[in-house]
Image (tube, coloured by chain):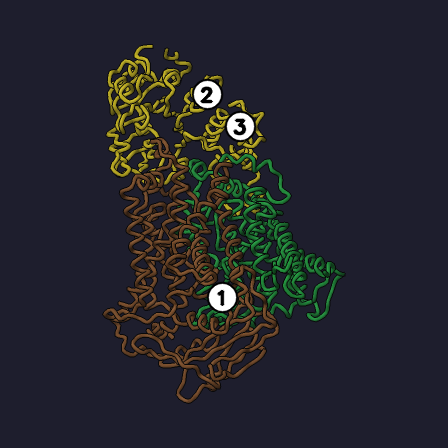
C-alpha cells in the first residue's frame, strides 16, 4: 500500500482542475437549487453549452476561438428558455424532469452521427484550443510547484486561470445574494406565493436565476474542455449533474463557500477512496477468506456507489454541509 | 444519412445485442463463478472482441454468416493506433488492449470480401467508452449485407413500427404506474424508479440464468421480489423521512442518490454488459399480416395488456383500488374519511414495485438485461405520466402507452440514435399546453 | 358589543354605510372594489358564485361564512391567485380580471394568507424589506452595483423598522422568522404587506392560530390601518373579532353572498343564522349581543 501516492493524488485532486470545474458547476447549481430552489438536473447540458460553444468555433463555424464564449452564452439562454418556459410556472418537480430529459437529449444530439458535422459526433472535437494554449506563460512539458502541489505547465495554464475564475464567480454570486435580488430569490425558495403576493414577478426571477446559474455552469464546461483540450459528449452525461449536486450538498447548500469547499472535498475523498481501492486490488482481486470481495474492474462502481450513498446521507443528515451550522436548517417548517 | 432506417437496419439494430449475447455464451463468458454469487474471476488481460457477420433476411428473420479475413483496427479517441487484427473463420477476432480507456474500433471496409458492404455505412466504427469498459472483454459486431429494406413497403414499415410501439408502450405503461401512484399518494417524484425496473431484470437474470429456474416459475418470484423491494424502500427510507418531516425536495434528492447507488450496485454485481435471459432467447418471427413479431414478444405483450387491464379493474372496482384513487386524489380528504393512508402508501409501493419488476422482466426478454435498462426508460416514463397526468393511475397507463407508440412511430422519421427525442417534445408540449396532463387534476398555474 | 368608532375615519366609514340597505349585493356610496358575476367551479363543484359585491373605501369589511362557503376562494380570485370561469371586478376603477397576482400590489391591493407565509429562513427585517415595491436592487444587473440601490435600501430599512416598532416587533428584528410564534408570524405578514403601501389590505383569517393575548392588539392594529386611510377586507371565523372591528359584514354560504349589513344587522339576520346552524351545528354566532 503506497500511502504516499494515494495521499498525494488525493491532495492534488483537492486543488486540481476537476475541483475547479466542479466548483464552477456547483456554484451555478447553487444559485439555482441552493438559493432559488430550482431543481436543475441538467447542469451537465449547461456545461456542454460552454464546451461546444468553444469546440464549434473550430469544428463548424471556422471562426476565432474567442467567439466560443458568446456562442456558449447564446446556447445557455436558448437552453434555459427551452427548459424554463414550460416548467417554471409549475411545481418544482417538473423542472427536474424536463432538465434531466433535455440534458440527455442534448447529449444524444451532440454525439449523433446525424449532426456530426456540427458537433463532431461521439469522437467530440479536439483541435480548437491552440489560441488559448499559445497565451500560456508556462512550458507545457515542465513541472512547477512543490510536492504534492506539483503540476505540469500544461495543467497550470488552465488550473490557475480556473481558480481565478472561481474566485471571481464566487464574488459575483456573493454580492448578488446580498443584494435585494438575492433576497427575492431566497424568498422564492421558501414560498413563492408569498413573494408573488408582494408584487414580484416570480417567473422572471426564476428564469434569471436559471440562466445565471446556467452561465456559470457553462464556464465550468469551458474550463473543463480547455483543460482536456477536447470536447467529449459523454463528459456531459446525466450523472455528472448528480456528482456536482453531491459536491454541493457536501459543502453545504446556499453558501458560496459551500460549492467550492464541497467540490474540493468531493475530489479529495473520491480520489482517495478510488486510489485506495485500486491499491487493494492492484495485485489481483481482494479476497477475504477465499471469497472475492472486490476486483480492480469493480473499483469504479464501488466509488460511485459511495457517491450515491453519500448524497442520500448528506441530504438527510447534514443538508447544511459537512461543516455547516445546523441552526438555519432547523428552521425548516416542512 | 437522412433516409429513415430501413427494416433491415432496424432488425440489425435489434439483433445486435442478441448476437453479442450468443457470442458471449459460446465463449463461456457467463462464468460459473457468477452463479455462486461471487464476482467473476478476472481474465488476465483486457481485450476487444470484434465480430464481422453477413446478415440477410430470410422470411423476415435475420440469418447470419461469419466473414473471415476482415481487418479491424483499434485506436484511441485521438486516432492513435493501438492494435489491430483480422477475423478468423468464425468471423471473430480478439484484440488485446493495454488498459481501460476509450477506444474506437473501426472495420477496414476495404478489407471486406468483394461485394460485401456494411448494412449501415455509418456503423463502420464504434466507440467503446472507458466508463463502460467494466468487464475485461468488450464485444463489437459489424454487420454486412443488403442495406435496402427489400420487400418492406411503406405500409408494412408503418405497421411494424406501430406494433413495436404498442409493445414498448405497454411496457412503459406497466413500469410507470408505480411512479405515478407514489407521486399521487406521497407527492414524491422517485428518480430511482428506473432502478426498480432494473431490479426486476436483475432478479430474473439471477433466477433464470444463474439458478436455472424456468421463467414460468422465476417470473412470479421476481414480481413478488419487486413488490417487496418497493416496500423495503418505503419502510427503510421514504416512510421514515416523511415521519421525520424531511421535505419533498430533499426526499427527491435522496431518490437521486438512491438511483446512483443502486445503478452502481447493479454494475458491480452484474457488470456493464447486457445479457440475455435463458428462456425464450431463440425465437423466429411470426408473420401476422405485415407485422413480424416473435412468439415471445407476442406473449409478453398480451400478458402486459392483461396485467394492465387487471390493474385498471382493481383500481376501478375493488375497495382498496378505490381507496388508492381517493388518496391519490386528495390525501387529506381521504384520511378524513377514515382511509388508512399509510396502508395505501404501502400498497402503492408494493404494487408499483411489482409492476416495475414485471416491466423489467419483459424488457429484459425484449431487449436484454443490463444495469441501465430501467434508468434508460425513466425519461420515457416521466413523459408518459406527465402526458397522462402526474398522480393519476389511469393517466400513467394511457400516457405511457401513448409515449411508447409515439416514440416508435416517430422513429420512422427520426434517426434511431435520437429515438427518445420525440418524448422530450411530448413532455414540453404537454407542459405548455396542458400541464395537468390528460387526466390530471387541474392545478393552479401562477 | 360593537366597538365605538375610535377615530374620524371610522366614524366616516360607519356614517357612509349606515345609509346602505343591508341586502346581498348592496350598492355602497364609494366602493374601492366592485365585483360582478364572479364564478369559479372545481370539477363539478361550484366554489364561488358571487353576483355582485362591493367594498366601501375606508371601511373595515369582514367576509364571513361557514366552512366551505368559498371565502378564501373568492379571496384568491380577487387577488389574482386563481382565475374565475367567468366574472370581472374592478379595483379603484381598474379592471382586475386577468391581472397576474404579482401585479396587484403595484396597483395598491395586497393580501395575506390563511396559513402564514413568513419566510422562515430570512430574518424578520429581510422579510419586511422584501415587501417594498420598485426596488432598484431587485434587478440583477443593478444588484451587482450597490451604490445604485444602497440609498433606497436604507430608506426601505427605516420604513421597515418603523413598521416593526408600530407592531411591537422591533426586538425580533434580526431573528429568523422561523423562530416567531404563530401570532407574531401573522403580525409580521401583515406588517410586510404594509411595506407595499397598499390602499386595500386583504387579510385571510388574521386571527387563526393567534393566542388570545395577542388578539386584542391585532384588532387594534387592524383598526389603525383604517385610521391611516386604508381599506381592509378580511376573512374571519372569529365572531368576536368581526363584531369588534368591522364596519360592514358580507356573509357567504355555498359560494354565494347571502347577506350583508353592519355587524348588528347581520347578527339578527335569520338567513345568516340558518346558514351557520345548517352547516355549523350550533357553533353559530349568537343572535343578539
Residue beneath the point at 40% across and 77% down = B120
Q: Which residue is mark 1?
A: B273
Q: Which residue is mark 3?
A: C180
Question: In terms of secondary structure, where does tag 2 sit?
Answer: helix
Question: In terms of secondary structure, where does tag 1 sit?
Answer: loop
Task: Indicate the chain coloured yellow by its letter.
Answer: C
On the question of residue C209 being in view, the answer is yes
Up-down relation of residue B145 to residue C46 (above or below) = below
Give the alpha-carbon distance from disc 2 to disc 1, as whole Å: 68 Å
Estimate how packed mark 2 is, as few (under 14), some (14 to 19) or many (20 or more) residues with alpha carbons within 10 Å: many
Q: Position of residue B287 (x, y in %)?
A: 26, 71
Q: Earlier in the sequence, mark 3 or mark 2?
A: 3
- The quadrant in which residue A325 appears is top right
Q: Which residue is mark 2?
A: C218
Q: Position of residue C270 (x, y in %)?
A: 24, 16
Q: Nearer the viewer, residue C271 or B6?
A: B6
Estimate how packed mark 3 is, as few (under 14), some (14 to 19) or many (20 or more) residues with alpha carbons within 10 Å: some
Q: Report the quarter where the C terminus of chain B lies.
A: top left
Give the alpha-carbon distance from disc 3 to disc 2, as whole Å: 15 Å
Q: Nearer the viewer, mark 1 or mark 3?
A: 1
Q: Nearer the viewer, residue B36 or C248?
A: B36
Amino acid at each position: 500500500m503506497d500511502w504516499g501516492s494515494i495521499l498525494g493524488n488525493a491532495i492534488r485532486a483537492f486543488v486540481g482542475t476537476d475541483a475547479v470545474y466542479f466548483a464552477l458547476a456547483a456554484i451555478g447549481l447553487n444559485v439555482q437549487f441552493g438559493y432559488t430552489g430550482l431543481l436543475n438536473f441538467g447542469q451537465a447540458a449547461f456545461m456542454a453549452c460552454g464546451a461546444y460553444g468553444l469546440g464549434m468555433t473550430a469544428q463548424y463555424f471556422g471562426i476565432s476561438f474567442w467567439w466560443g464564449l458568446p456562442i456558449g452564452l447564446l446556447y445557455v439562454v436558448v437552453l434555459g428558455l427551452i427548459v424554463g418556459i414550460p416548467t417554471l410556472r409549475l411545481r418544482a418537480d417538473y423542472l427536474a424532469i424536463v432538465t434531466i430529459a433535455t440534458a440527455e437529449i442534448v447529449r444524444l444530439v451532440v454525439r449523433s452521427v446525424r449532426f456530426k458535422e456540427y458537433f463532431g459526433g461521439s469522437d467530440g472535437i479536439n483541435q480548437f484550443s491552440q489560441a488559448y494554449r499559445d497565451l500560456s506563460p508556462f512550458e507545457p512539458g515542465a513541472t512547477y510547484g512543490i510536492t504534492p502541489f506539483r503540476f505540469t505547465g500544461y495543467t497550470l495554464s488552465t488550473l490557475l486561470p480556473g481558480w481565478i475564475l472561481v474566485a471571481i464567480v464566487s464574488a459575483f454570486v456573493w454580492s448578488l445574494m446580498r443584494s435585494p435580488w438575492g433576497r427575492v430569490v431566497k424568498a422564492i425558495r421558501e414560498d413563492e406565493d408569498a413573494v408573488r403576493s408582494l408584487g414580484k414577478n416570480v417567473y422572471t426571477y426564476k428564469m434569471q436565476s436559471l440562466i445565471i446559474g446556467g452561465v456559470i455552469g457553462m464556464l465550468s464546461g469551458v474550463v473543463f474542455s480547455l483543460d482536456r483540450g477536447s470536447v467529449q459528449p459523454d463528459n456531459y452525461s446525466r450523472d455528472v449533474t448528480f456528482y456536482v449536486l453531491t459536491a454541493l450538498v457536501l459543502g453545504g447548500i446556499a453558501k458560496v463557500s459551500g460549492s467550492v469547499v464541497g467540490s474540493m472535498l468531493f475530489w479529495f475523498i473520491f480520489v482517495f477512496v478510488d486510489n485506495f481501492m485500486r491499491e487493494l486490488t492492484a495485485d489481483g482481486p481482494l479476497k477475504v477468506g477465499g471469497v472475492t470481495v472486490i476486483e480492480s474492474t469493480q473499483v469504479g462502481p464501488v466509488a460511485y456507489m459511495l457517491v450515491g450513498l453519500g448524497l442520500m446521507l448528506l441530504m438527510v443528515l447534514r443538508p447544511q454541509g459537512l461543516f455547516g451550522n445546523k441552526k438555519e436548517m432547523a428552521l425548516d417548517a416542512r | 444519412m437522412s433516409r429513415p432506417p430501413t427494416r433491415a437496419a432496424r432488425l440489425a439494430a435489434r439483433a445486435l445485442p442478441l448476437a453479442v449475447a450468443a457470442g458471449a455464451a459460446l465463449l463461456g463468458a457467463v462464468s460459473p463463478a457468477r452463479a455462486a454469487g461471487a464476482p467473476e474471476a478476472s481474465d488476465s488481460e483486457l481485450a476487444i472482441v470484434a465480430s464481422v457477420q453477413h446478415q440477410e433476411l430470410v422470411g423476415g428473420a435475420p440469418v447470419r454468416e461469419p466473414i473471415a479475413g476482415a481487418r479491424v483496427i483499434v485506436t484511441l479517441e485521438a486516432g492513435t493506433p493501438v492494435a489491430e487484427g483480422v477475423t478468423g473463420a468464425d468471423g471473430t477476432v480478439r484484440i488485446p488492449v493495454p488498459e481501460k480507456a476509450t477506444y474506437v474500433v473501426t472495420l477496414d471496409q476495404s478489407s471486406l470480401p468483394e461485394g460485401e458492404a456494411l448494412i449501415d455505412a455509418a456503423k463502420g466504427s464504434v466507440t467503446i467508452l472507458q466508463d463502460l469498459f467494466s468487464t475485461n472483454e468488450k464485444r463489437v459486431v459489424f454487420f454486412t449485407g443488403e442495406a435496402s429494406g427489400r420487400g418492406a413497403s411503406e405500409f408494412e414499415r408503418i405497421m411494424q413500427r406501430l406494433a413495436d410501439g404498442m409493445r414498448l408502450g405497454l411496457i412503459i405503461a406497466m413500469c410507470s404506474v408505480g411512479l405515478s401512484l407514489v407521486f399521487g399518494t406521497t407527492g414524491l417524484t422517485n428518480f430511482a424508479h428506473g432502478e426498480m425496473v432494473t431490479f426486476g431484470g436483475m432478479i430474473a437474470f439471477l433466477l433464470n440464468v444463474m439458478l436455472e429456474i424456468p421463467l414460468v416459475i422465476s417470473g412470479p418470484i421476481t414480481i413478488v421480489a419487486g413488490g417487496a423491494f418497493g416496500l423495503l424502500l418505503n419502510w427503510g427510507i421514504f416512510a421514515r423521512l416523511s415521519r421525520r418531516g424531511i421535505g419533498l425536495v430533499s426526499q427527491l434528492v435522496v431518490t437521486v442518490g438512491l438511483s446512483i447507488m443502486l445503478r452502481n450496485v447493479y454494475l458491480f454485481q452484474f457488470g456493464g454488459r447486457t445479457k440475455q435471459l435463458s428462456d425464450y432467447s431463440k425465437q423466429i418471427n411470426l408473420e401476422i399480416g405485415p407485422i413480424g413479431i416473435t412468439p415471445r414478444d407476442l406473449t409478453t405483450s398480451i400478458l402486459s395488456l392483461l396485467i394492465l387491464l387487471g390493474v385498471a379493474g382493481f383500481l376501478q372496482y375493488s375497495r382498496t383500488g378505490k381507496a388508492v384513487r381517493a388518496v391519490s386524489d386528495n390525501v387529506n380528504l381521504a384520511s378524513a374519511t377514515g382511509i388508512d393512508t399509510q396502508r395505501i402508501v404501502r400498497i402503492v409501493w408494493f404494487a408499483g414495485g411489482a409492476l416495475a419488476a414485471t416491466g423489467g422482466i419483459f424488457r429484459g426478454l425484449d431487449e436484454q438485461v443490463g444495469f441501465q435498462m430501467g434508468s434508460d426508460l425513466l425519461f420515457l416514463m416521466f413523459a408518459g405520466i406527465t402526458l397522462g397526468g402526474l398522480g393519476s393511475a389511469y393517466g400513467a397507463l394511457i400516457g405511457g402507452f401513448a409515449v411508447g407508440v409515439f416514440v416508435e412511430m416517430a422513429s420512422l422519421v427520426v434517426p434511431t440514435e435520437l429515438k427518445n427525442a420525440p418524448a422530450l417534445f411530448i413532455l414540453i408540449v404537454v407542459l405548455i399546453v396542458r400541464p395537468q396532463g390528460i387526466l390530471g387534476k387541474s392545478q393552479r398555474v401562477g | 358589543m360593537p366597538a365605538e368608532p375610535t377615530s374620524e375615519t371610522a366614524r366616516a366609514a360607519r356614517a357612509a354605510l349606515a345609509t346602505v340597505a343591508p341586502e346581498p349585493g348592496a350598492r355602497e356610496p364609494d366602493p374601492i372594489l366592485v365585483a360582478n358575476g364572479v364564478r369559479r367551479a372545481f370539477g363539478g363543484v361550484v366554489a364561488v358564485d358571487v353576483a355582485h359585491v362591493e367594498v366601501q373605501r375606508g371601511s373595515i369589511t369582514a367576509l364571513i361564512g361557514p366552512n366551505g362557503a368559498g371565502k378564501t376562494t373568492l379571496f384568491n380570485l380577487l387577488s389574482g391567485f386563481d382565475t374565475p370561469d367567468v366574472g370581472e371586478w374592478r379595483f379603484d376603477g381598474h379592471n382586475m380580471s386577468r391581472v397576474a397576482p404579482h401585479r396587484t400590489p403595484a396597483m395598491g391591493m395586497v393580501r395575506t394568507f390563511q396559513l402564514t407565509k413568513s419566510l422562515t429562513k430570512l430574518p424578520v427585517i429581510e422579510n419586511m424589506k422584501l415587501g417594498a415595491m420598485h426596488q432598484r436592487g431587485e434587478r440583477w444587473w443593478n444588484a451587482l452595483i450597490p451604490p445604485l440601490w444602497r440609498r433606497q435600501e436604507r430608506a426601505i430599512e427605516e420604513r421597515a423598522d418603523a413598521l416593526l416598532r408600530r407592531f411591537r416587533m422591533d426586538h425580533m428584528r434580526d431573528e429568523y422568522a422561523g423562530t416567531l410564534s404563530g401570532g407574531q408570524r401573522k403580525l409580521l405578514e401583515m406588517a410586510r404587506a404594509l411595506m407595499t403601501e397598499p390602499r386595500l389590505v386583504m387579510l385571510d383569517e388574521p386571527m387563526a392560530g393567534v393566542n388570545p393575548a395577542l388578539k386584542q392588539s391585532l384588532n387594534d392594529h387592524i383598526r389603525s390601518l383604517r385610521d391611516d386611510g386604508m381599506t381592509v377586507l378580511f376573512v374571519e371565523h372569529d365572531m368576536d373579532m368581526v363584531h369588534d372591528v368591522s364596519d360592514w359584514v358580507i356573509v357567504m354560504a355555498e359560494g354565494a353572498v347571502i347577506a350583508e349589513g353592519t355587524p348588528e344587522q347581520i347578527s339578527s339576520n335569520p338567513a345568516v343564522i340558518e346558514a351557520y346552524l345548517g352547516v355549523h351545528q350550533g357553533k353559530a354566532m349568537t343572535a343578539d349581543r
